[in-house]
Image (cartoon, rainbow, N blue to C red):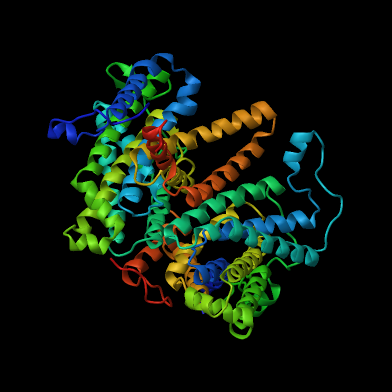
Amino acid sequence: MLYREAGDFKTTYAADSQTFPIRSDRWRYFAVLAIAWGVIPFVIDDYWANAILVPFLIYSIAAIGLNILTGYCGQVSLGTGGFMAVGAYSVYKLMTMFPEVSIVVHVILAGGITALVGTAFGLPSLRIKGFYLAVATLAAQFFLVWLFNKVGWFYNYSASGQISAPERFVAGVAVTGANTAPWAQYLICLAFVTVCAIVARNLTRGSVGRKWMAIRDMDIAAEIIGVNPLTAKLSAFAVSSFFIGISGALFFAVYLGAVEVGEAFGIQKSFLVLFMCIIGGLGSIFGSFAGAAFLVLLPVALKVLGVDLLGWPSSTVAHLQLVAVGALIMFFLIKEPHGLAQLWRVTKEKLRLWPFPY
Amino acid sequence: MSADFLYMIEVVINGLMAGVLYALVALGFVLIYKASGIFNYAQGVMALFGALTLVGIMEGQVPFAHIINATFGTDLHQFGWTVPALLAILLTVGVMILLAWMVHTFVFRHLVGQEPIILFMATIGLAYFLEGIGDLMWGSDIKTLDVGIPQGGSLWVENLSSGLGGEDFYGFFIDKLDITASVVAILLVAGLIAFAQYTKQGRAMRAVADDHQAALSVGISLNFIWVLVWSLAGMVALVAGIMWGAKSGVQFSLSLIALKALPVLMLGGFTSIPGAIVGGLIIGVGEKLFEYTIGPMIGGATENWFAYVLALLFLVFRPQGLFGERIIERV
């Protein structure tokens, strides 16, 4: 009743191969876009922007990026934090070296630089896989963080070793720096998220994505049917790092404003993004959003519940959060290895038949 | 002999001592990996948890004191007794066995037959869980652990070796704790090898490591063996936790040595106990030497990444490690 495809006839090839072939899916997608673009910017306040919406959007981009690599191409990476740091430091260098160029260009260029670095660290994936590769990406994580800590050129020899974003404008409105309005922060992140999600969705539907999935499912068979593992794996690393670089750039420039590399982009960040992919669902763009939303909301919800309602000390609640995240990871891996995205699929399947399941 | 050369030797010896601790953690990995194919990322957190529990029991802390106090408005912190070190260690071993049973029964029994990478991610979840539980139970402040291991530089070694160099050389500085740790590690490895070679359970353990189905068909209980290896790994973790905790306090950074154990295993091979030891020593010596010789030229603090980059290079040229079996999947 609520959700069905009956009566939804396609008369053109274009209609048949569109992103959301079912009409109610399409309407929901437009509704989400309309609310995100048309309603939220007018009602957003500082707390919602800083605590929930902006980190959610930025982590969504990172989760989409990692999902392309891990979920679609099957290459596990623990170097996400390091690659986000590459994005952050590239955008910082670009912003300070070419102040007259728009920040949007800088963020995209930062993604491109990260893609190059990611491809370089993806080279071992041609010879190894599984958690051997995971350890290889750990080398990227630790080496990159060390590099940004030690080489003064990256942080312009500032005394504190931190980098902080100068004020930049898009269409006359400040989007970085201390005087940024919450809605401006939100909108620039939303713009990047929308474009990234559409690009990622279409990449994974097309021939590139099919090659990735073939490599993921069985690399030898994929090679036999004519998928070149070299280009498939390296392109997955490049595209994934591109998204992760953009999210790192936004995380630094728009969200935090000032960053100390070991603290903001440490190994914990790599795990956090990996958990988003697992909880949301590996191999699903919707899952990336769901996982990011879940792990951004969980600490906030626990804090509201524990500190504000029960009056527990905040350190106890922080530990409880670790327990909850760990338990959820194990629970999801046991009960629903395909994550929240699979729960959503099952729900839709039920809704199609409801109320007459037979 | 010149003083520079002797300092170099001192760096190597200290590296060996650090390597022993890496090797101890890596040993726990190898045990679980051989028997069940699970790559246990939580090994380091198990070391932390073991050390925390030991301190908590010795000092008679009330577990979950913070939550109990916050919920019921009480003011509990201590039971008011202290437990002697030996008894406390025995009790902690009991806790680790209980933990092993719970981990197996509630988590990994349901994940049998999954892909290795899924199991690996589950252990990352376990690591988070244990870390949170450890902090909730015993509090997150840095604790000192004193189980009566001698500490401080060994004067005996210092006096004995000071004759080797010239006037500006005062002998090797070696911590007594490191010496104790090495001796304990050697005993532990000898004990484990003896256990695996000469006891019934040890033979069963090796049979499971060889072939799950064949082991099942001759009547070996897989569940029992898995709990056994998790318990053994828990005890090895406890030993590593005691040594590391006595050296630099029981704190979160303890769990980070687990990450160092990954490159150790890359070098030594995932399936080899001697490999874990040799790999640990190579990484320990390698990173100290690199820091001593090349570190000052490129800004220092290279210990954070040297091990991983070394492992990365190793992976490209010899993916099975020094002693591992040649069954790695190549693409």
Residue B149 drawn at (x, y percent): 73, 67
Residue B74 drawn at (x, y percent): 82, 36
Residue pictured at 24% horizontal, 47% vertical: A209
* Viewer-closest of A120 and A65: A65
Outermost residue, front side: A358
Q: Is residue A61 above or below residue B329?
A: above
* Viewer-closest of B300 and A295: A295
Outermost residue, top side: A42
- The mark total stands at 0
Residue B25 drawn at (x, y percent): 56, 66
Tell me which corner region of the image, top left, top right, bottom left or bottom right, holds residue A198. top left
* Viewer-closest of B273 and A217: A217
Q: Quadrant of the C terminus of chain B?
A: bottom left
Relative horizontal placement of residue A131, taking residue B80 as reference (left or right): left
Outermost residue, bottom side: B198
Outermost residue, left side: A12
Residue B253 drawn at (x, y percent): 58, 53
Residue pictured at 39% horizontal, 63% vertical: A132
* Viewer-closest of B265 and A249: B265
Tell me which corner region of the image, top left, top right, bottom left or bottom right, holds residue B185. bottom right
Relative horizontal placement of residue A206, taking residue B49 as reference (left or right): left
Tell me which corner region of the image, top left, top right, bottom left or bottom right, holds residue A286. top left
Please indicate, yes or no, whether residue B192 appears anywhere in the rendered image.
yes
Please indicate, yes or no, whether residue A97 appears anywhere in the rendered image.
no
Q: Is residue A259 above or below residue B255?
A: above
